[in-house]
Amino acid sequence: MRKLFFILVGIVIVSCATSKSTTKPKLPPIIICDENAKIYDQDSRFELNNLTSLDRLSYATTYTRFSTATDSLEKNEIRYRLAKVSEKVALKVFPNAELTDASSLLKKSYNEIVSPILRLKYGEGRQEDFETLNIPNDSGLQLFLEVQNYTGDGIFTNYISIFVIDTKKQEVKYYDFIKYTCDPRDETMFMKTLYYGMNKLKNSIK
């Protein structure tokens, strides 16, 4: 009986140790951005604009990728919340845009979505890449945004890629790349940056 007791105690200790070692860190408390925080327009050499019209535009979603070490549940919570915020901005800038059901796209893992996005950025998109990122509808043009978040020396850096994809021809018609250094959970600065990028897209049509 005594032997059994020590075995059970040992199991409990090992279980607790394992639990602690596998617990992933949480993000620190949210840091509100300076109201004068800057938006950096990157002037990427891959920047592209072959648009002649934004008629029949649909909005897919904004997919946020965190390179910061944090719990996956926390990442997903932030990703879905920012996607909702982005939807509101998109409808303000493009009130006639058709909304899509982005639930399947938001559920995709980083591994599923990283390579297709990179190939589209470099002008090397394949049919399967467009199929991964597009939400089928009859709009013709679809707006899709990606947010990449990094943390270094306590500073959040966010890169926003803005794509307009021709879903019929399966080609990128517009690509832009902007950056801001701020906690991505600060929705005010996030919206300010989105308004900048989406209005730039809107005003790119002469």
Image (spheres, rainbow, N blue to C red):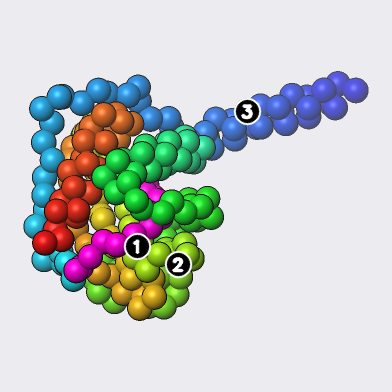
As drawn, 73 above or below 109: above
Using a 10 Å C-alpha cutoff, classify the residue at mark 1 as few (fewer than 14 neighbours), some (14 to 19) or many (20 or more): few
Which residue position holds label 3? 16
Q: Nearer the viewer, residue 107 or 172?
A: 172
Q: Nearer the viewer, residue 121 or 11?
A: 121
As drawn, 128 above or below 27: below
Residue 78, how many percent across, how many down?
Answer: 42, 36
Using a 10 Å C-alpha cutoff, classify the residue at mark 3 as few (fewer than 14 neighbours), some (14 to 19) or many (20 or more): few
Asked whether the viewer can see residue 20, the reply is yes
Residue 50, how many percent across, how many down?
Answer: 18, 71
Examine the image and state in which quarter residue 111 appears: bottom left
Which residue position holds label 2? 138
The CA distance from mark 2 to mark 1 is 8 Å
**Marks 3 and 1, the one that precedes in the sequence:** 3
Instruction: Name the kind of residue labelled 2 in the image.
Output: Asp
Which residue position holds label 1? 56
Residue 20, how many percent across, how many down?
Answer: 55, 30
**Marks 2 and 1, the one that precedes in the sequence:** 1
Instruction: Name the kind of residue labelled 3 in the image.
Output: Cys
Name the quadrant of the C terminus: bottom left
The CA distance from mark 3 to mark 1 is 56 Å
Residue in the image at 11% along x and 49% along y: 41
Residue 76, how many percent across, how many down?
Answer: 48, 41
Q: Is residue 65 magenta?
A: yes
Q: Which residues are magenta?
A: 51-68
Q: Is residue 86 magenta?
A: no
* In contact (CB < 8 Å): disc 2 and disc 1: yes
| Secondary structure of the residue carrying numbered label 2 | loop
Mark 3 or 2: in front is 2
Name the quadrant of the N terminus: top right
